Amino acid sequence: MASLFATTRELGGIAIVDLSGRISLGDGSALLRKTVRDLLDEGRTKIILNLGDVNYIDSSGIGELVSGFTAVRNRGGELKLLNLTKKVNDLLQLTKLFTVFEVHNDESGAVRSFR
Amino acid sequence: MAPETKHLEVTLDTHVESVNLAEEMCVRVAEAAGFNEDECYRIGMSVREGVINAFHYGNQEKPEKKIHLAIELTGERMVIRVMDEGKGFRLNDVPDPLAEENLLSTSGRGIFLMKAFMDEFDVLPGRTGGAELVMAKRLPLLGSTSNNGNGNTGSSDAAPHQEA
């Protein structure tokens, strides 16, 4: 079963993490945790998680998203979500996390929102 | 004549891979039973959450303990049971993940998702000493209007009875 892949790039001082695959118990959640932690260790606290190619998140993955959100906020930064697939969108609605995360549908708008 | 009941039971190790295995197994059974892609996703997710619960909370990730998975196809429903070898818990004691104070919790959404995605859900004292999670979904041909899997928070009245 496919796991998660993450690639980080930078645009205008914002770290954009392109994720693809599954954020689920095991390798997927662990990679997301490490990716966000590494960015924070580098002092990068403006982060966008591009979930456009994430087709599956379980409760462990949801927990990891929340954990990342809190960790970034505790460093005075912001973690925002970009390009949710329908399944992920529905899950965030169901769990009321849409009221917690700032969600964007286009990358330039997401980047501009940090200024 | 009553339709034949099909029954499948497996014992899984307390290991992360068991979560994927259980999900795949149940999705295949659900596909064969005629559930559509969305319903298979919901069933798979529910089983996954049930086995995560058994792996993490029930068996506390102790490798010497086992997870017992049973799938039953009756003429009307697909019934899935996930049993652990932990101490058991009561459904009423599980915090509401939608409560304001729990929204930023990093755990505690599995039970909520199972309730939301299945037609019936309950937690019983398990035959193996721990908790027995029982979840069911009506088969597509008989449950046409209420078979969307969303918004149903489950009911102990509707849950299947524990086997003797």
Image (cartoon, coloured by chain):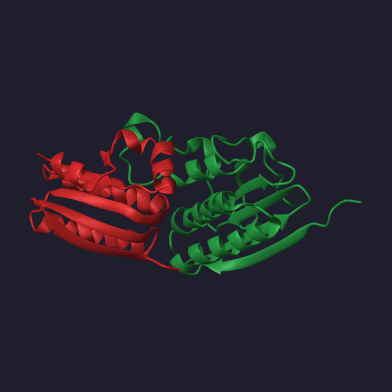
| Camera-nearest residue between A78 and B82 | A78
Q: In which quarter of the image is residue A108?
A: top left
Residue A81, horizontal then vertical, whole percent: 27, 46
Q: Is residue B90 visible?
A: no
Q: In which quarter of the image is residue B33?
A: bottom right
Q: Can residue B10 be seen in this view?
A: yes
Residue A85, horizontal then vertical, whole percent: 39, 49
Residue A52 horizontal side relative to residue B138, left or right? left
Residue B33 horizontal side relative to residue B37, left or right? right
| Camera-nearest residue between A110 and B40 | A110
Vertical position of residue A108 compared to residue A9: above or below: above
| Camera-nearest residue between A20 and B99 | A20
Q: In which quarter of the image is residue A1?
A: bottom left
Q: Residue at x 22, y 57 (%)?
A: A17
What number of labels is visible?
0
Residue A55 horizontal side relative to residue B139, left or right? left
Tell me what hue chain B is rendered in. Answer: green
Direction right: furthest residue = B1
Vertical position of residue B83 compared to residue A74: above or below: below
Q: Which residue is drawn at 36% across and 48% down?
A: A62
Direction top: furthest residue = B100
Vertical position of residue A3 compared to residue B2: above or below: below
Q: Which residue is drawn at 37% across and 46% down?
A: B107
Residue A27, horizontal then vertical, whole percent: 35, 65
- Chain represented in red: A
